[in-house]
Amino acid sequence: MTVTLLGPAQIRDLAARAGVRPTKALGQNFVLDGGTVRKIVRQADVEPGMRVVEVGPGLGSLTLGLLEAGADVVAVEIDPVLTRLLPGTVGEHAGLRPLDEPGRVALADDEGRIRLEVVLQDALDVTELPGEPPRALVANLPYNVSVPVLLTFLERFASLEHGLVMVQAEVADRLAAPPGSRTYGVPSAKAAWYADVRRTATVGRSVFWPAPNVDSALVRLDRREPPVTTATREDVFAVVDGAFAQRRKMLRSALAGLFGSADAAVAALAAAGVDPQARGETVDIAAFARIAEHLPRDRAVRGTVEP
């Protein structure tokens, strides 16, 4: 299958013909540069036949790059105009044909293999995806919801073995930060529950339309098992949230509300082998899990928590 990537002129022409203007409300910044697209795909280790989920495909720049590498793509898009536009663009530039099934937006190759399926939905509301479970998440994530989307997909789709996402550079630093660094916080600890995370490259502003006011970066995630613990993920994340709610507080004070009192928090921290005078920024996810094991039963989290 021969795939032609989109260039700057084609992207602007597509948008103009469809009446599309990137909006800050949806965090839309479209990638203009084919070299950047191929760099993302390459660093994501995309293989022929790999099932990949893409969030926010926009006008299709990265989608075409994934198809060029041989991936089968399920694209989740919140914008109905872009959802309608994407199949035509991919069909023209990748030689795929629409699948004739009512209620399903999909494209197949000449052998009938479905290569692209488009889901019109808010990524934060997606609980299932069509077709085979995806092995990789590869996306230029909308800046305004990048962390919630990433953590939500890692939680809901256990089939994801790895991911490569483009996010705001500051967010990339927070996601990949180790304990003890000044940028370590809630996103760092929660991402570490699911995966080993590292920042791989900086992406300049000129490759986007419109050009954002900040630099971007690529973040690689490789799935690993969470810490061995008797605590639930919800309990662990509640402890993480509590520890960073007032970042400069010592844990004995920061977690007093969650454990019922400062004395109870001190006892739980001591039992977990964590210094009560430490601050959340020094504690790794395994230690947060040990702390959560000592939550009083009546204070343990029973429902869901924010990703």
Image (tube, rainbow, N blue to C red):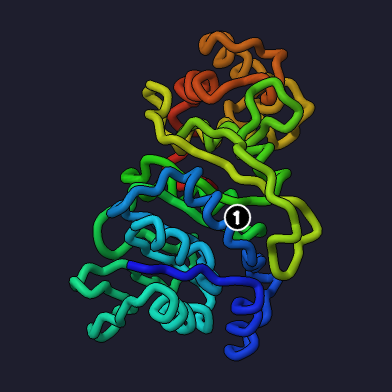
Crowdedness near tag 1: few (<14), some (14–19) or many (≥20) residues, C-alpha within 10 Å: some
- Percent coordinates x, y for residue 180 in the rendering: 70, 20
Residue occupying the point 42% across, 66% down: 75
Q: As drawn, which residue projects farthest toward the left?
A: 111
Q: Is 110 placed above or below 299 here?
A: below
Q: Is residue 245 above or below residue 13?
A: above
The structure residue drawn at horizontal position 43% and vertical position 29%, both measured from the top left corner, is: 297
Above-or-below relation of 6 to 286: below
Q: Indicate the quadrant containing the N terminus: top left, top right, bottom left or bottom right.
A: bottom left
Q: 11 or 1, which lies in front?
A: 1
Q: Is residue 54 visible?
A: yes
**Residue 251 visible, this angle:** no
Q: Is residue 239 left or right of residue 134?
A: right
| Nearer to the camera, 285 or 165 | 165
- Amino acid at the residue labelled 1: Thr
Report the number of numbered marks.
1
Q: Is residue 187 depicted above or below 216 in this figure?
A: above
Residue 65: x and y in percent read 47, 61
Image position, residue 286 (x, y; %): 50, 21
Pick the front one: 94 or 190: 94
Identify the secondary structure beneath mark 1: helix
Answer left or right for 184 relative to 45: right
Q: Which residue is mark 1?
A: 36
Q: Percent position (x, y) of residue 271? A: 52, 10
Quadrant in the rendering for residue 248: top right
Q: Residue at x 58, y 42 (%)?
A: 219
- Determine which quarter of the picture holds residue 254: top right
Q: Pick out the residue farthest to the front.
A: 2
